[in-house]
Amino acid sequence: MIRTTDLRKVYQMGDVQVKALDGIDLTIDKGEFVGIMGPSGSGKSTLLHMLGLLDQPTDGQIWLDGVAVNKLTDYEKTMFRLYKLGYVFQDYALVPELTVSENVSLPAMLRLDRNEEEIARSTTEILERIGIADRCCHLQKELSGGQQQRVAIARAIVNKPDILFADEPCANLDTENSRMVLGLFREINDEMNQTIVMVSHEEWHKEYFHRIIKLRDGKIIDYGK
Ligand SMILES: Nc1ncnc2c1ncn2[C@@H]1O[C@H](COP(=O)(O)OP(=O)(O)OP(=O)(O)O)[C@@H](O)[C@H]1O
Ligand SMILES: [Mg+2]
Protein backbone atom coordinates (compact mmCIF):
# COMPACT_ATOMS: atom_id res chain seq x y z
CA MET A 1 0.00 0.00 0.00
CA ILE A 2 2.78 2.44 1.02
CA ARG A 3 6.43 1.89 0.18
CA THR A 4 9.45 4.18 0.23
CA THR A 5 13.08 3.60 -0.68
CA ASP A 6 15.91 5.80 0.57
CA LEU A 7 13.56 8.73 1.09
CA ARG A 8 15.39 11.98 1.86
CA LYS A 9 14.39 15.53 2.63
CA VAL A 10 17.04 18.20 3.09
CA TYR A 11 16.16 21.75 4.09
CA GLN A 12 18.74 24.38 3.19
CA MET A 13 18.85 27.02 5.94
CA GLY A 14 21.43 29.56 4.77
CA ASP A 15 24.71 27.65 4.92
CA VAL A 16 23.29 24.87 7.05
CA GLN A 17 21.69 21.71 5.68
CA VAL A 18 19.03 20.09 7.84
CA LYS A 19 18.52 16.44 6.99
CA ALA A 20 14.88 16.16 8.07
CA LEU A 21 14.64 12.68 6.51
CA ASP A 22 17.85 10.74 6.11
CA GLY A 23 17.15 7.58 4.12
CA ILE A 24 13.74 6.16 5.04
CA ASP A 25 12.85 2.67 3.78
CA LEU A 26 9.44 1.48 4.85
CA THR A 27 6.45 -0.60 3.84
CA ILE A 28 2.96 -0.20 5.29
CA ASP A 29 0.33 -2.77 4.30
CA LYS A 30 -3.33 -2.19 3.49
CA GLY A 31 -5.40 -2.08 6.67
CA GLU A 32 -2.53 -1.27 9.02
CA PHE A 33 -2.96 1.42 11.67
CA VAL A 34 0.60 2.69 12.08
CA GLY A 35 1.89 5.21 14.59
CA ILE A 36 4.88 7.36 13.67
CA MET A 37 6.61 8.32 16.90
CA GLY A 38 9.81 10.03 17.98
CA PRO A 39 11.11 13.18 19.65
CA SER A 40 10.37 16.71 18.46
CA GLY A 41 12.33 17.48 15.29
CA SER A 42 12.88 13.81 14.42
CA GLY A 43 11.10 14.18 11.06
CA LYS A 44 7.61 12.81 11.79
CA SER A 45 5.66 15.63 10.11
CA THR A 46 8.11 15.78 7.24
CA LEU A 47 7.61 12.05 6.60
CA LEU A 48 3.82 12.39 6.73
CA HIS A 49 3.92 15.33 4.31
CA MET A 50 6.04 13.33 1.85
CA LEU A 51 3.81 10.25 2.07
CA GLY A 52 0.69 12.42 1.76
CA LEU A 53 2.02 14.21 -1.35
CA LEU A 54 1.89 17.55 0.43
CA ASP A 55 5.59 18.22 -0.21
CA GLN A 56 8.37 16.96 -2.50
CA PRO A 57 11.21 14.77 -1.24
CA THR A 58 14.79 15.76 -2.08
CA ASP A 59 15.56 12.19 -3.09
CA GLY A 60 14.15 8.65 -2.96
CA GLN A 61 11.00 6.93 -4.18
CA ILE A 62 7.45 6.64 -2.88
CA TRP A 63 4.83 4.16 -4.09
CA LEU A 64 1.22 4.49 -2.99
CA ASP A 65 -1.08 1.69 -4.04
CA GLY A 66 1.54 0.60 -6.58
CA VAL A 67 1.86 4.05 -8.19
CA ALA A 68 5.30 5.71 -8.29
CA VAL A 69 3.84 8.99 -7.08
CA ASN A 70 6.96 11.16 -7.40
CA LYS A 71 6.72 10.73 -11.15
CA LEU A 72 3.23 12.26 -11.29
CA THR A 73 2.66 15.82 -12.52
CA ASP A 74 1.29 18.39 -10.07
CA TYR A 75 -2.18 17.99 -11.54
CA GLU A 76 -2.01 14.20 -11.24
CA LYS A 77 -0.87 14.54 -7.62
CA THR A 78 -3.82 16.81 -6.85
CA MET A 79 -6.17 14.21 -8.35
CA PHE A 80 -4.41 11.42 -6.46
CA ARG A 81 -4.87 13.32 -3.18
CA LEU A 82 -8.53 14.03 -3.93
CA TYR A 83 -9.44 10.47 -4.93
CA LYS A 84 -7.18 8.38 -2.72
CA LEU A 85 -5.96 10.24 0.36
CA GLY A 86 -7.50 11.84 3.44
CA TYR A 87 -5.93 14.15 6.02
CA VAL A 88 -6.50 15.15 9.63
CA PHE A 89 -4.37 17.89 11.18
CA GLN A 90 -3.83 19.02 14.74
CA ASP A 91 -5.52 22.40 14.17
CA TYR A 92 -8.58 20.79 12.47
CA ALA A 93 -8.21 23.07 9.39
CA LEU A 94 -11.95 23.59 8.94
CA VAL A 95 -13.37 26.43 6.86
CA PRO A 96 -14.82 28.82 9.48
CA GLU A 97 -17.48 30.32 7.19
CA LEU A 98 -18.98 26.93 6.32
CA THR A 99 -21.31 24.78 8.40
CA VAL A 100 -20.37 21.32 9.64
CA SER A 101 -22.21 19.65 6.73
CA GLU A 102 -20.65 21.98 4.20
CA ASN A 103 -17.16 21.36 5.56
CA VAL A 104 -17.67 17.61 5.40
CA SER A 105 -19.08 17.62 1.85
CA LEU A 106 -16.35 19.90 0.50
CA PRO A 107 -13.88 17.19 -0.67
CA ALA A 108 -16.76 15.22 -2.20
CA MET A 109 -17.96 18.29 -4.13
CA LEU A 110 -14.54 18.71 -5.71
CA ARG A 111 -14.87 15.30 -7.35
CA LEU A 112 -16.29 14.96 -10.83
CA ASP A 113 -17.76 11.51 -10.25
CA ARG A 114 -20.20 12.34 -7.45
CA ASN A 115 -23.61 13.96 -7.82
CA GLU A 116 -25.36 16.19 -5.31
CA GLU A 117 -27.74 13.57 -4.02
CA GLU A 118 -24.95 11.09 -3.43
CA ILE A 119 -22.85 13.71 -1.63
CA ALA A 120 -25.75 14.70 0.65
CA ARG A 121 -26.35 11.04 1.47
CA SER A 122 -22.74 10.19 2.26
CA THR A 123 -22.33 13.40 4.30
CA THR A 124 -25.36 12.56 6.47
CA GLU A 125 -24.19 8.96 6.84
CA ILE A 126 -20.75 10.01 8.01
CA LEU A 127 -22.01 12.69 10.40
CA GLU A 128 -24.21 10.06 12.01
CA ARG A 129 -21.42 7.54 12.03
CA ILE A 130 -19.16 10.02 13.83
CA GLY A 131 -21.84 11.15 16.24
CA ILE A 132 -22.05 14.77 15.18
CA ALA A 133 -25.26 14.77 13.10
CA ASP A 134 -27.05 17.03 15.60
CA ARG A 135 -24.46 19.73 14.93
CA CYS A 136 -24.74 19.61 11.13
CA CYS A 137 -25.79 23.25 10.68
CA HIS A 138 -23.42 24.80 13.17
CA LEU A 139 -20.29 26.79 12.43
CA GLN A 140 -16.82 25.83 13.65
CA LYS A 141 -16.82 28.52 16.37
CA GLU A 142 -19.93 26.92 17.91
CA LEU A 143 -18.18 23.59 18.45
CA SER A 144 -15.83 22.25 21.11
CA GLY A 145 -12.32 21.13 20.13
CA GLY A 146 -13.35 17.47 20.24
CA GLN A 147 -16.36 18.17 18.03
CA GLN A 148 -14.22 20.16 15.57
CA GLN A 149 -11.81 17.25 15.27
CA ARG A 150 -14.73 14.86 14.70
CA VAL A 151 -15.89 17.07 11.83
CA ALA A 152 -12.35 17.08 10.42
CA ILE A 153 -12.28 13.26 10.58
CA ALA A 154 -15.68 13.07 8.86
CA ARG A 155 -14.36 15.34 6.11
CA ALA A 156 -11.21 13.22 5.77
CA ILE A 157 -13.16 10.01 5.18
CA VAL A 158 -16.12 11.28 3.14
CA ASN A 159 -14.39 10.25 -0.09
CA LYS A 160 -13.49 6.82 1.35
CA PRO A 161 -9.76 7.37 0.93
CA ASP A 162 -7.36 4.46 0.52
CA ILE A 163 -5.05 6.01 3.10
CA LEU A 164 -5.83 8.33 6.00
CA PHE A 165 -2.98 10.54 7.26
CA ALA A 166 -3.15 12.27 10.64
CA ASP A 167 -0.49 14.57 12.12
CA GLU A 168 -0.89 14.80 15.91
CA PRO A 169 -4.70 14.94 15.69
CA CYS A 170 -4.97 14.88 19.49
CA ALA A 171 -2.41 17.61 20.19
CA ASN A 172 -5.05 20.20 21.12
CA LEU A 173 -7.43 17.80 22.86
CA ASP A 174 -7.79 16.64 26.46
CA THR A 175 -7.42 12.96 27.34
CA GLU A 176 -11.12 12.16 27.02
CA ASN A 177 -11.38 13.70 23.54
CA SER A 178 -8.06 12.15 22.52
CA ARG A 179 -9.46 8.73 23.44
CA MET A 180 -12.57 9.53 21.42
CA VAL A 181 -10.46 10.39 18.33
CA LEU A 182 -8.19 7.35 18.72
CA GLY A 183 -11.22 5.11 19.30
CA LEU A 184 -12.84 6.48 16.17
CA PHE A 185 -9.71 5.74 14.16
CA ARG A 186 -9.71 2.20 15.52
CA GLU A 187 -13.35 1.72 14.51
CA ILE A 188 -12.77 3.11 11.01
CA ASN A 189 -9.74 0.87 10.74
CA ASP A 190 -11.63 -2.24 11.95
CA GLU A 191 -14.83 -1.70 10.01
CA MET A 192 -13.49 -0.37 6.74
CA ASN A 193 -10.01 -1.91 6.79
CA GLN A 194 -8.86 1.69 6.44
CA THR A 195 -5.09 2.17 6.28
CA ILE A 196 -4.15 4.89 8.78
CA VAL A 197 -0.79 6.56 9.36
CA MET A 198 -0.80 8.75 12.44
CA VAL A 199 1.96 10.89 13.96
CA SER A 200 2.01 11.09 17.73
CA HIS A 201 4.45 11.76 20.54
CA GLU A 202 2.23 10.56 23.38
CA GLU A 203 3.42 7.26 24.85
CA TRP A 204 -0.10 6.22 25.91
CA HIS A 205 -1.34 6.35 22.29
CA LYS A 206 0.77 3.24 21.61
CA GLU A 207 -1.96 0.84 22.68
CA TYR A 208 -4.13 1.96 19.75
CA PHE A 209 -1.60 1.25 16.99
CA HIS A 210 -0.91 -2.07 15.27
CA ARG A 211 2.66 -1.02 14.75
CA ILE A 212 4.92 1.84 15.72
CA ILE A 213 7.66 3.24 13.52
CA LYS A 214 10.11 5.24 15.62
CA LEU A 215 12.18 8.05 14.16
CA ARG A 216 15.24 9.84 15.44
CA ASP A 217 17.25 12.43 13.50
CA GLY A 218 15.40 11.60 10.28
CA LYS A 219 16.13 7.86 10.49
CA ILE A 220 14.02 4.85 11.48
CA ILE A 221 15.39 3.49 14.75
CA ASP A 222 12.58 1.00 15.34
CA TYR A 223 10.50 -0.47 12.54
CA GLY A 224 8.03 -2.14 14.85
CA LYS A 225 8.17 -5.51 13.11
N1 LIG B 1 10.13 24.15 6.22
C1 LIG B 1 11.25 23.87 6.90
N2 LIG B 1 12.37 24.56 6.71
C2 LIG B 1 13.51 24.24 7.37
N3 LIG B 1 13.62 23.24 8.24
C3 LIG B 1 12.52 22.51 8.49
C4 LIG B 1 11.27 22.78 7.84
N4 LIG B 1 10.35 21.89 8.27
C5 LIG B 1 10.99 21.11 9.15
N5 LIG B 1 12.29 21.47 9.29
C6 LIG B 1 13.30 20.82 10.14
O1 LIG B 1 13.30 19.43 9.84
C7 LIG B 1 13.42 18.67 11.04
C8 LIG B 1 12.23 17.73 11.18
O2 LIG B 1 11.04 18.51 11.38
P1 LIG B 1 9.62 17.88 11.57
O3 LIG B 1 8.65 19.00 11.59
O4 LIG B 1 9.41 16.82 10.56
O5 LIG B 1 9.74 17.22 13.02
P2 LIG B 1 8.63 16.51 13.94
O6 LIG B 1 9.17 15.17 14.30
O7 LIG B 1 7.31 16.56 13.27
O8 LIG B 1 8.65 17.44 15.24
P3 LIG B 1 7.44 17.85 16.24
O9 LIG B 1 7.21 16.68 17.15
O10 LIG B 1 8.00 19.02 16.98
O11 LIG B 1 6.24 18.20 15.40
C9 LIG B 1 13.57 19.67 12.18
O12 LIG B 1 14.94 19.83 12.44
C10 LIG B 1 12.97 20.92 11.62
O13 LIG B 1 13.56 22.07 12.19
MG1 LIG C 1 5.48 17.52 13.73
Image (tube, grey):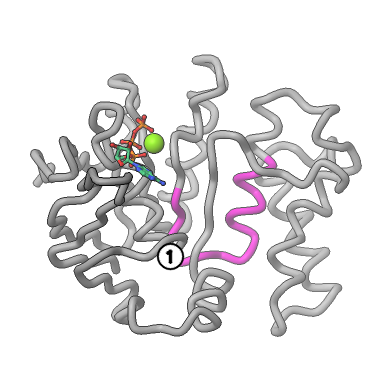
Few, some or many residues within 10 Å of mark 1 (<14, 14–19, 20+): many
Image vertical order of residue 83 relative to residue 37, above or below? below
Range of the magenta residues? 151-165
117 in relation to 201, above or below: below
Q: Label 1 is placed on what type of residue?
A: Leu
Q: List the residue tagged with mark 1.
A: 53
Residue at point 22% right, 72% down?
61
Which residue sits furthest top?
A: 175
Towards the viewer: 9 or 204: 9
Horizontal side, residue 89 vs residue 48: left or right = right
The answer to whether residue 54 is left or right of residue 204 is: right
Residue 153 belongs to the span the image colors magenta:
yes
Query: Where's residue 181, x and y in %?
Result: 53, 32
Q: Quadrant of residue 221?
A: top left
State the residue at coordinates (85%, 74%). 116
Residue farthest to the right, as pictured:
137
Please, is residue 191 above or below residue 62 in the view?
above
**SS at badge 1:** loop
